[in-house]
Amino acid sequence: MIALRQIEYLLPKNKLLIKKKYKFVNNLFLKEKIGATKVTRFSAKDTVINICTNLVKRKISIDRFKEKIGAVILCTQNPDFNWLPHNSSVIHHNLGLNEKVACFDISQGCAGYLYGIVASNSFLKKGQYGLLLTCDPYSRIISKDDFSTDILFGDAASVSVLKKDGYGKKLIDYEFFSYGKDYEAIINRNGLKMDGKKVMKFCTTIVPSKINDFLKKNNLTTDLIDQFYFHQGSKYIVDQICFHLKISKSAKAPVVKNIGNTVSSTLPILMRKYDYKKKKKIVVCGFGVGLSVSIGLIVWVC
């Protein structure tokens, strides 16, 4: 099994002040429905490769286990170079890693973090480490005149240090679901477009239903889970999932304010910010583009 040994993240200093750009927006709507009055933005000169490379160098002491790194995985839908080469290979070069490392990118968006953890289990040998990176600057593909998406998405990046076997917080069960018939609900055709009604229905009906099924499969109830980490599509979406699951939204399912939907980075940011290491049983759930859902149960394993 894969242990989560360390999680770090980076938020850009630049922020879009929503009310300043869209003066007609109600502040109460932003706070109660979106969960943000400002969203993070990387600058135009920030590249995914440089963001991820600098994050690792600044926050992770990789010299302690550099020769034991067996995989570099990057979850992004907005890579540099239009996908060729895979950005993880350039990050591998920038970090000075040896040649015996598997490098690959995952285009999975909001559900992608769990995909990365599960995939790493196949590439790492016992005792090896992996770097799982997330960086999805959707500000690059948002249609600047599309108010409904511009106010939702923020930019961020994260890095998780994974280890095959050993002690730590481990993903002991997981489920993935795909709804390809609705692929056009979130799509990039010369700019990101979303079918808001279809996405909202998906997030507030199918997602909580699948979480309930997942808990039942593991003989768990919401009372037995110490913390839920839900993808931060918006505050309203998180609130609705909590309502359907009948859990306390403030205590059990935190919302990060004034960042926005940071796509594949939302789950690692939540876990780091709300101290996943101190929670005994954790349920994480990512959902979005595809449409897709990923659900995982994380517990402490010696």
Image: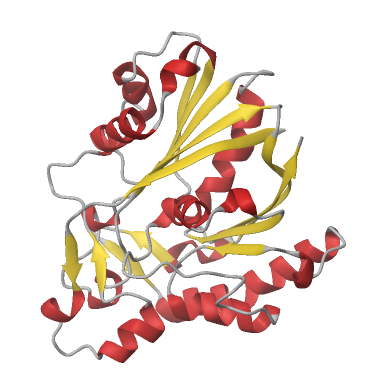
The image position of residue 129, as x and y in percent, is: 56, 23
Using the rendered view, name the quadrant where residue 192 is placed: bottom left
Q: Is residue 120 left or right of residue 36?
A: right
- Residue 160, relative to residue 223: is it above or below? above
- Residue 268, relative to residue 225: is it above or below? above
Using the rendered view, name the quadrant where residue 260 is placed: bottom left
Residue 121 in sight: yes
Q: Is residue 161 left or right of residue 187?
A: right
The image position of residue 54, as x and y in percent, is: 27, 32
Q: In front here: 105 or 216?
A: 216
Identify the residue at image location x=72%, y=44%: 300
Please name the colour scheme applied to the rendered image.
secondary structure
Using the rendered view, name the quadrant where residue 295 is placed: bottom right
Residue 135 in sight: no
In the rendered image, the residue lying farthest to the front is 278
The image position of residue 83, as x and y in percent, is: 32, 34
- Residue 113, relative to residue 248: is it above or below? above
- Residue 273, relative to residue 195: is it above or below? above
Identify the residue at image location x=44%, y=77%: 235
